[in-house]
Image: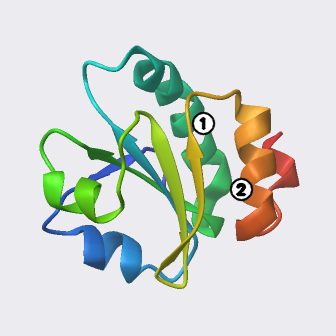
Amino acid sequence: MVTDVADVTDVNFAEQVIGADVPVLVEFTADWCPPCRQMKPVLKALAAEAGDRLKVVRLDVDSNPLTTNAYQVRSMPTFLVFRGGEPVKAMVGARPKRRLVAELEEVAGEFSSLH
């Protein structure tokens, strides 16, 4: 079971996100972003509790401009949910875990045990 949030890069984004066989939540983040820092414990808990039902990763926007620009990310944190290799939902801004889980359930399946 995955218990932490993995880092992805321009180099491995296609393999880790597009090629994943489960829904993937990608946080586009930056070290200098206070709301991004607020989300770290939320995402870590989500990754631990979701197990094999959801993959949670983060991408540093400053170090990975190709992917950041490809998905037109302009604000941090931005969350993109990928399912079947395609982005199916975008969310911008920090949010409580309960709200994040509810938004994920709209597009990525049932996570009621994560509330």
Q: Which residue is mark 2?
A: 104
In the rendering, at what x and y percent does residue 94 appear? 57, 27
The residue carrying mark 1 is 45
Q: Is residue 57 above or below residue 99?
A: below
Q: Residue furthest top?
A: 34
Q: Position of residue 89 (x, y in %)?
A: 62, 62
Q: Residues within 10 Å of mark 2 (few under 14, many from 20)?
A: many
Q: Which residue is found at the position 70% from the left and 41% from the top? A: 100
How has the structure been colored for display? rainbow
Choose between 115 and 66: the one closer to the eye. Answer: 66
- Which residue is at 56% across, 76% downward? 22
- Where is 34 relative to 106, above or below? above
- What amino acid is found at the position of numbered circle 1 in the picture? Ala
* Badge 2 element: helix
In this image, 83 relative to 35: left or right?
right
- Which residue is at the front of the view, 39 or 32? 32
> What residue sits 80% from the left and 62% below the top?
106
- Residue 3, visible in the rendered structure: no
Which type of secondary structure does the marked residue at label 1 adopt? helix
Q: Check if mark 1's residue and mark 2's residue have beta carbons within 8 Å.
A: no
> What's the residue type where badge 2 is placed?
Leu
Q: Mark 1, residues whose alpha carbon is within 10 Å: few (<14), some, or many (≥20)?
A: some
The answer to whether 34 is drawn above or below residue 3 in the figure is above
Q: State which quarter of the image contains the C terminus.
A: top right
Side of 108 where 35 appears, left or right: left
The residue lying at 51 percent from left, 37 percent from top is: 44
- Report whether residue 98 is seen: yes
